[in-house]
Image (cartoon, rainbow, N blue to C red):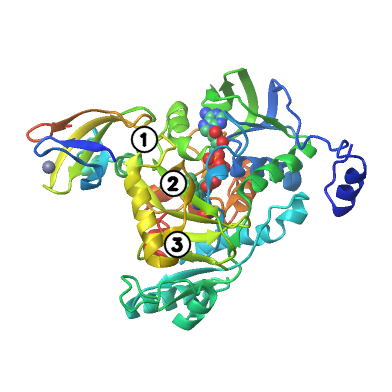
Amino acid sequence: MTRRYSAFSLFVEGLRGQTGWAPAWRTPKPKAQYDAVIVGGGGHGLATAYYLAKNHGIRNVAVVEKGWLGGGNTGRNTTTIRSNYFYPESVALYDFALRLYEGLSRELNYNVMFSQRGLVTVAHSEAEMEIAARVVNAMQINGTDAELLGPEEVLKREPLLNMSDRARFPVFGGVWQGRAGVARHDAVAWGYARAADRMGIDIIQDCEVEGFLVEDGRCAGVETAGGTIRAGAVGLAVAGHSSVMAAKAGFGLPIQSYSLQAMVSEPVKPCMETVVLYPGTGTYLFQSDKGEIVVGGGIDRVPSYAQRGNPPAQRQVLSGLLEMFPAFGQLKLMRQWAGNVDVTPDSSAVLGPSPLPGLYLNCGWGTGGFKSIPAGGWLLAHLIAKGEHHEISRPFDLSRFMTGRLVDEAAGSGIAH
Amino acid sequence: MQLFSCPFCGPRDETEFHFAAEAGKTRPEPAGEVSPEAWSGYLYAKSNPGGPSREIWQHVTCGEFFLMERDTLTHEVAGSKALRGQRP
Ligand SMILES: Cc1cc2nc3c(=O)[nH]c(=O)nc-3n(C[C@H](O)[C@H](O)[C@H](O)COP(=O)(O)OP(=O)(O)OC[C@H]3O[C@@H](n4cnc5c(N)ncnc54)[C@H](O)[C@@H]3O)c2cc1C
Ligand SMILES: [Zn+2]
C-alpha cells in the first residue's frame, strides 16, 4: 500500500495502474473512552487533533463530526490567508497561522496549494490613504510584512481595475501584504485529517454530538447519536453551531450566527494576479487556479442557520464587483453558496476554557477563520493538553467580555469578521 | 428577496430592516449589586437559537423598533408585533 505522497510514489502508482493507494483515513467505530474528544471536523477541529498528537504526544483522541469532513465553513470558504491586522494580539495570532501555512504542505505531506500571491486592500481617498499608512505602520511594528502602494503600483498588479475618473470608488493606493494568498480549502481539512489519522486519531463522521456528559460539575464526555463517548477533555470547534452547543453545556456565548455567501464565475483565462479587497464596496475577489473568479463580501444581515445566502447580499457583492472590474460584466456565474458563521461583537475569536470545566472553546472566527486554522488547532491542543493558555491565545479568552479588554479589529483594521 | 412586516408600515423589503437584539433580555438591577458576570451576560451573551427565535428589529425607514418572531433555520416569519407600552 502506498501511504506517502511524492513524485516517486505517483510515478510508481502510475506503473501499477493506481491500484496501491491506501485510503487517506480510516472509518473507525468510536471507542467508549478517549483522552480527548474534539467536536467538529472542520479545519480547526482536525488541526487540533493533529497537534494534540504531534506536539503533545496525546494520540488517544477522536474527532466527532455530524456531517462530513470540511462540510461546514472550511469547505465553503474563499480561502484568503493574511495577517494584516492592527492589534499586536491579532498579528501574533494570524501571523503565527500564516507562518505555519508556509510550511504546511511539507508538514502534512499533502499539497494544500498555498499560493502567496499577495493581497491588496485598496484605499479610495486621501483620507483613506492616511489610514492605510497607519495600518502599514502597525503591521510592520507588529512584525509582519506590509507595504503602502501608490495607485500605479496597484494598477500594475491589477490592470483591469476601474481607472475611470468617474469611478465611485477610485484607486488612490492600498495596503499590500505580499505573503498573503489563497490555499485549497478541502486540502487543508483532508491534509490534517490524513496526518492525524496516521498518528492514530479516530475521525468519526456522520455522528452528531447531542449533548455533554457532566460529572461532578465537569465535562466528562459527549452524548452522540451513537451513544456516550467518555473523554478526559472536550474541545468544541463547531463554528456557527457554537451557541447551540454552549446552550447544551449550560452557558451563553457572545456569538450571533449569520449566513456568509460566496460565488464563482465560469473559468476564464488568467487575468488577475492577486487578491483584491475594496473596503468601499465590501467585495473581494481573486482568480482560482482553475480560472474561476471567486467573489465574496459581507454577511447577510439576518441572523441565520440556513447556510443559504439571500439575494440582497448577493446583489451588493456583485454590484461591487462590477464597480471594481467593469470588464467582468460579461462573466457568467456558475455557483453561489453560503456557510454559517459565528460572529462576535469585537470581530475576534474566542479561545480558552469554557464556563464548564473540562470543555474548551475554539469559536467566534466569523467570516475569517480559514486563515487561522493551523494556529487555532495548535492553541486549542495546547489548552487541552496543558489545561492553560498559550501566550498567543490568552488575549482571546472569553473573560475579555467581562473585563472589557476587547480586541476590536472592526475598529482597528476596518475588517469586520 | 424576503418581505418583513413592520407593524406600522406593512410588508416591506428585508433591506429596509435592521436586526437589533434578541427579545426578552431584562437589564439586571440595581446596578450596584450586579456582578461582573451578570452584567457581561446582559451585554454580550446571546441565546442565538437555531430554529424559532424572538427578535427585536428596527424598520429603519420609519424608525420604529418592534418584535418579530421568525425561524433562523427556515427564515419563515411567524409575525410582527409593536412594542409600545409593553415589555418584550
Ligand atoms: C462563504 C465564506 C467565505 C469565507 N472566506 C474566508 C476567507 O477568505 N478567509 C478566511 O480566513 N476565512 C473565511 N471564511 C471563514 C472560515 O470558513 C471559517 O472561519 C472556518 O472555516 C471555520 O473553521 P471551523 O473548523 O471552526 O468550522 P467549520 O469548518 O464550519 O467546522 C465545524 C464543523 O462542526 C460540525 N458540527 C456542528 N455541530 C456539530 C455537532 N453537534 N456535532 C458534531 N459536529 C458538529 C459541522 O458539521 C462542521 O463540519 C469564510 C466563510 C464562508 C462561509
Ligand atoms: Zn415601519
To which chain does the residue with label 3 belong? A
Camera sees residue A282: no
Of callouts 2 and 3, the N-terminal one = 2
Q: Nearer the viewer, residue A174 or A403?
A: A174
The disc label shown at residue B48, or none: 1
To which chain does the residue with label 2 belong? A
The 10 Å Cα crowd at callout 3, few under 14, some 14 to 19, many 20 or more, is: some
Q: CA distance from mark 3 to mark 1?
A: 38 Å
- Left/right placement of residue A164 relative to residue A358 reads left
Q: CA distance from mark 1 to mark 2?
A: 19 Å
Disc 1 secondary structure class: loop
Disc 3 secondary structure class: helix
Residue A64's place in the image compared with A275, above or below, is above
Q: Which residue is mark 2?
A: A261
Q: Position of residue B43 (x, y in %)?
A: 30, 44
In the image, the residue with mark 2 has its CB under 8 Å from the nearest atom of ligand 1: yes
Amino acid found under the numbered disc labelled 2: Gln
Quadrant position of residue A29: top right
Residue A26's place in the image compared with A237, above or below, is above
**Pointers 1 and 2 within a single chain:** no
